[in-house]
Image: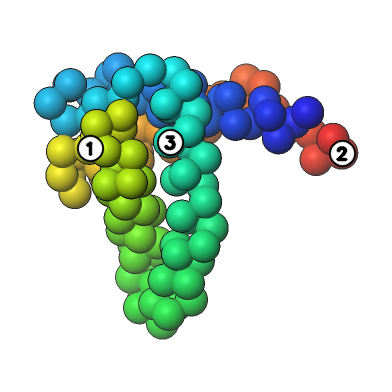
Amino acid sequence: MRFIINILLTGLAIFLAALILPESAVRIAGFGWAILAGLIIGFVNATIGTMLRIFTLPLNLLTLGLISFIITVLMVQLTSYFMGSKFDVANFWWAAVFAIIVALIELLFNSIFGSKDSD
């Protein structure tokens, strides 16, 4: 049950971030597509993103985690490429702003709804 709630909250965070940013920067076709974008971002981050983080671990330690953020931004752009016109991010910089806003919204949601590890 908690997994489904997390998916819905991530979709809502993506949808709200797309509403906050100008339409020329980030476009999303609707809430359902935002949920799908959240699932795809999570999947590519867990697979390709993890492999990239392992390969760039020394550089990541040297830059104090900046490389992990850049990899996350690249995963957002990869998701934009996969989803075509349903989820579109204009460029790297807008993807970076989008990733920051989504992270802040998810942080807000986690502080409001909390996370129960026992579920």
- Residue 113 found in image quarter: top right
Q: Amino acid at mark 2?
A: Ser
Query: Mark 3: few, some, or many residues within 10 Å (few <14, many ≥20)?
Result: many
Residue tagged 2: 118
**Rendered position, 108 above or below 94:** above
Q: Amino acid at mark 1?
A: Val
Instruction: Say whether residue 97 is left or right of residue 103.
Output: left
Tell me, for residue 12, which label it has, or none.
none
- The residue lying at 48 percent from left, 72 percent from top is 51
Q: Sequence-wise, which precedes: disc 1 or disc 2?
A: 1
Under tag 3, what secondary structure? helix
Q: Sequence-wise, which precedes: disc 2 or disc 3?
A: 3
Where, quadrant-wise, is the N terminus in this rendering?
top right
Image position, residue 37 (x, y; %) = 43, 36
Residue tagged 3: 37
Image position, residue 34 (x, y; %) = 43, 27
Tell me, for residue 89, which label it has, or none.
1
Image position, residue 108 (x, y; %) = 52, 25
Under tag 1, what secondary structure? strand
